[in-house]
Image (spheres, helix red, strand yellow):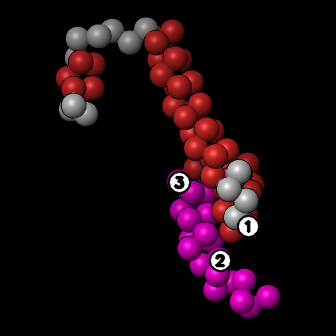
């Protein structure tokens, strides 16, 4: 089923309006996932989300920001014992 996307894109012309709709839909799904995760109330998750946002604002590289935040979330239990 997932392979049908690239196959269909051969036959469908992507107008600017459709491209905007697809980009907006992807952003809306990402925001919904992040908001749902942040609502869980876990301090490590909320810290990772804040660090991701701050890194994204400073370095403007989403890949580095997400990898750094994943590492922070993974090592948060060990870091919290140090302080």
Residue 73 within the magenta-colored segment of the rendering = yes
Element class at badge 3 = helix
**Lower sequence index among marks 1 and 2:** 1
**Lower sequence index among marks 3 and 1:** 1
Which residue is pictured at 57% across the width and 24% down the height? Answer: 24
Q: CA distance from mark 2 to mark 3?
A: 20 Å
**Percent of width and height locating residue 80:** 72, 83
Crowding near the residue tagged with mark 2, few <14, some 14–19, many ≥20 C-alpha atoms within 10 Å:
some
Element class at badge 2 = helix
> Which dot, 3 or 1, sits closer to the camera?
1
**Lower sequence index among marks 2 and 3:** 3
Q: CA distance from mark 3 to mark 1?
A: 22 Å
Q: CA distance from mark 1 to mark 2?
A: 9 Å
Residue holding disc 2: 76
Viewer-proximal residue among 43 and 12: 43
**52 to 11, vertically: above or below:** below
Residue holding disc 3: 63
If the image is split into quadrants, where does the N terminus sit? top left
**76 to 60, vertically: above or below:** below
Residue extent of the magenta highlight: 63-83
| Mark seen at residue 43 | 1
């Amino acid at each position: 089923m997932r392979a049908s996307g690239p196959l269909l894109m051969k036959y469908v012309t992507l107008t600017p309006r459709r491209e905007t709709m697809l980009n907006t839909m992807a952003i809306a799904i990402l925001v919904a996932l992040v908001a749902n995760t942040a609502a869980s109330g876990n301090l490590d998750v909320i810290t990772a989300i804040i660090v991701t946002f701050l890194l994204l604002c400073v370095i403007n590289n989403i890949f580095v920001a997400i990898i750094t935040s994943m590492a922070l979330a993974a090592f948060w239990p060990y870091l919290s014992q140090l302080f």
